Image: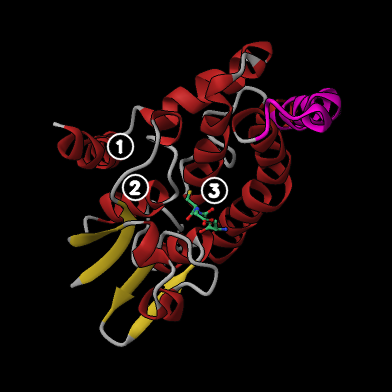
Amino acid sequence: MITITGFKWVPPFARGLVRDLRVRWALEEAGLSYRVRLIDAADKESVEHRALQPFGQVPTYEEGGLALFESGAIVLHIGARCEALLPADEGARARAVTWVFAALNTVEVAVQQLAALDLFYADQPWAKSRRPGAAAAVKQRLAELAAWLGDREYLEGRFTAGDLMMCTVLRILRHTDLLDAEPALAAYKERCEARPAFQKALADQLASFEEREA
Ligand SMILES: N[C@@H](CCC(=O)N[C@@H](CS)C(=O)NCC(=O)O)C(=O)O
C-alpha cells in the first residue's frame, strides 16, 4: 500500500495549495490506491519524519521499502506507472519531464517568492519594497508561458505530468489577479483543474481540514 503525508491542519490561505495535492492528483490519475498519514507541527520535527523528509516538509511517499520526498520526484515516480502522466514515447516522455522541471525550477521559484512576500511577510517594510520586483518577475514568467502555450490545450498538446505540476504552481497565485492578464493561461489552469482526478484530490485534501474543524 502506498502511504503519503499531508498536514492535519493549515490556515485557510493554504488549503488546496499544500503540496501533497500534487501527489494525491497523480495517484488519482494513475488509479492507484493510497492512504494519507496526516501530521502536525510536532510530527514534522520528529526523527521518524526527518528520516523520510530531511527538511521536515510534506509530502512524502512510502511504498514497500521505498521512501521518497519532493513532490516533483514523487509525481515522476508515479508517472512511470501512468501513461496519462508520462507518455510511453521516449521523446514525449522527456518533454513531459522537462515541463515538470520548468514548473518547479523556473516558474514556481518566481511564484513562491511573491507568495511568501504576500502571505508570510506582508507587514514587513522590506517585503513592501521587494513586492513590485517580485510581481514583475511573475508577470514575465506568465507572459512567457502564455506565449509557449499559444492555442495548445496543454503544454505539449496532450495532458502530462508537466501540466499537473504547472497547474499547481499557477494555483499559488490565487490571492492575486496576475493570471487575469493572461486569459489563455487562466483557461489552461481551469482545464487542468476540471480533470476528475484533480477534483477528487482537492476534495479529499479540503475534507481532512474541514473534518478537524467540524
Ligand atoms: N520542494 C518541496 C516543497 C515542499 C513544501 O514546501 N511543503 C510545505 C507544504 S506545501 C511544507 O511542508 N511546509 C512546512 C515547512 O516547510 O516547514 C516539494 O515540492 O515537495
**Residue labelled with disc 2:** 25
Q: Which label was assigned to residue 84?
A: none
Q: Residue at x 31, y 51 (%)?
A: 24
Mark 2 CB near ligand 1 (8 Å cut): no
Disc marking residue 202: 1
- At label 2, counting other C-alpha atoms closer than 10 Å, the crowd grade (few under 14, some 14-19, many 20 or more) is many
The image shows residue 66, relative to residue 92, as above or below, that is below
Q: Position of residue 164 (x, y in %)?
A: 47, 44
What is the spatial separation of the Cα atoms under label 1 and label 3, in whole angstroms?
A: 18 Å
Pointers 1 and 2 in contact (C-beta within 8 Å) = yes
State the quadrant of the C terminus: top left
- Is residue 58 found left or right of 178 in the rendered image? left
| Pointer 3 or 2: first along the chain | 2
Residue 163 position (above or below residue 49): above
Would you say the residues marked 3 and 2 are in contact, meaning their CB atoms lie under 8 Å apart? Answer: no
Find residue 131 and report its horizontal and vertical position in percent.
79, 26
- State which quarter of the image contains the N terminus: bottom left
For the stretch drawn in magenta, the main secondary structure is helix
Mark-to-mark CA distance, 3 and 2? 13 Å
The span picked out in magenta is: 121-145
Q: Say which element carries label 2.
A: helix
Question: What label does residue 162 carry, if any?
Answer: 3
> Image check: 130 left or right of 14?
right
Counting from the top left corner in percent of width and height, residue 44 is at 40, 65
Residue 212's spot in the image, x, y percent? 18, 40
Task: Give amino acid for label 1.
Answer: Leu
Indicate the amino acid at tag 2. Answer: Trp
In front of the other: label 1 or label 3? 1
Residue placed most toward the observer, 154 or 2? 2
Q: Can residue 64 be seen in this snapshot?
A: yes
In front of the other: 116 or 105: 116
